[in-house]
Amino acid sequence: MRAIFDLGIRCPGEIALVSFDDLEWFNYIQPRVSAVAQPTYELGARAAERLLRRISEEQTGPPERETLTTELWVRESSVSTWDH
């Protein structure tokens, strides 16, 4: 955001901005920042469970892959002002 502001680039308009993790302060700046909200608590809990299973040797073999649900919060920083 600072670089965009310092370079005089319009956000939105000339550039769109989307972040990972929906930080609370994204709602209190202008433009409000769009974000992909990740289930951070669940992500940490699942990672810890898997690590503990590996340490206790209850699980062997290749790493597992799991996809958790995310949400996209579209706010002013990524709303196009261009006519389509």
Image (cartoon, rainbow, N blue to C red):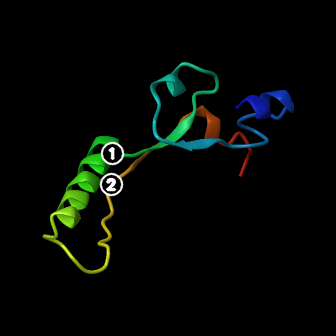
Check contact, mark 2 vs mark 1: CB within 8 A: yes
In terms of secondary structure, where does tag 2 sit?
loop
The residue sitting at 68% across, 43% down in the picture is 16
The residue sitting at 71% across, 39% down in the picture is 81
**Based on the displayed image, in which of its 4 quarters is residue 65 positioned?**
bottom left
The residue sitting at 26% across, 80% down in the picture is 61
17 or 60, nearer to the observer = 60
Closer to the camera: disc 2 or disc 1?
1
Distance from Cα at disc 2 to Cα at disc 1: 7 Å
Q: Residue furthest top?
A: 28
Identify the amino acid type marked 1: Pro
Q: Position of residue 66 (x, y in %)?
A: 30, 66
First in sequence: mark 2 vs mark 1: 1
Q: Position of residue 36 (x, y in %)?
A: 47, 45
55 or 75, nearer to the observer = 55
Q: Residue furthest bottom?
A: 61
Q: Residues within 10 Å of mark 1 (few under 14, many from 20)?
A: some
The disc placed on residue 22 is none
The disc placed on residue 39 is 1
In terms of secondary structure, where does tag 1 sit?
loop
Q: Position of 48 compared to 36: left or right? A: left
Q: Position of 36 compared to 77: left or right? A: left
Identify the amino acid type marked 2: Thr
Tell me if residue 17 comes above or below residue 26 in the rendering.
below
**Based on the displayed image, in which of its 4 quarters is residue 50 positioned?**
bottom left
Res. 72 visible in picture: yes
Q: Position of 84 compared to 28: left or right? A: right
The disc placed on residue 69 is 2
Q: Position of 70 compared to 36: left or right? A: left
The residue sitting at 70% across, 32% down in the picture is 1
